[in-house]
Image: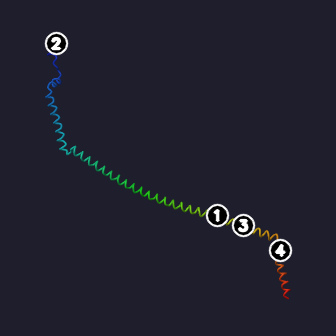
Amino acid sequence: MIDLAEDKPTNPLLRIGAQPIALTAAALLLLIAGVTSMAIWRAYTGHAPEADRVVTSRLLQARTAQASEQLVEKTKGLEATQQESIDQLQVVQDQLQTVKRLLAMQQSDTKRLSEQVATLNESIDGLRQSFASVRATEAETPSVTRRKPARRAHASARHHKSRS
């Protein structure tokens, strides 16, 4: 048969595992000692994690507020620039409308003047043709024109004779 006395564990960790309350108490004491030493060290050096967190959060809030103010200022600047651009665009559109009206007036004046020039050209052509036909008529009857003054002279001589 197997002897149970020989099966006793020779490992010391197995003997400690047999007494769990003592092991738990020792672990708890180590934990409390560690936490206490950390608290004493932080109190001595003046660093508290809550204070660090508060300071960090306040810095973040200040940076956020500053960034927000900068965004508001930039937005206002963009709005002002946009309004100026709109005003300038309105001025340009008004000027464009004025130029369009002036161009339309100039075009109508040009058309009217072109029509007047065409009418004058027609009148001048008519006068040229009339003058040419008068010259042609004078060229065909040059003796008649010369006779008229001679007749007058002849008639004047008759008139003088009848008076005498």
- At label 1, which amino acid type do we have? Glu
- 3D distance between C-alphas at marks 4 and 2: 181 Å
Q: Earlier in the sequence, mark 4 or mark 2?
A: 2
Say which element carries label 2: loop
Q: Position of residue 52 (x, y in %)?
A: 24, 45
Q: CA distance from mark 1 to mark 4?
A: 42 Å
Measure the C-alpha gap from mark 1 to mark 3.
Answer: 16 Å
Q: Nearer the viewer, residue 123 or 83?
A: 123
Which residue sits at x=85%, y=86%?
162
Comes first in the chain, label 2 or label 3: 2
Asked which secondary structure carries label 4, the reply is helix
Q: Nearer the viewer, mark 2 or mark 3?
A: 3
Residue, disc 4: 144
Q: Secondary structure at mark 3?
A: helix
Circle 3 residue = 126
- Which residue carries the number 1 mark? 115
Residue type at tag 2: Ile
Looking at marks 1 and 2 on the same chain, the residue that comes earlier in the sequence is marked by 2
Q: Residue at x 30, y 51 (%)?
A: 65
Front residue of 117 and 43: 117
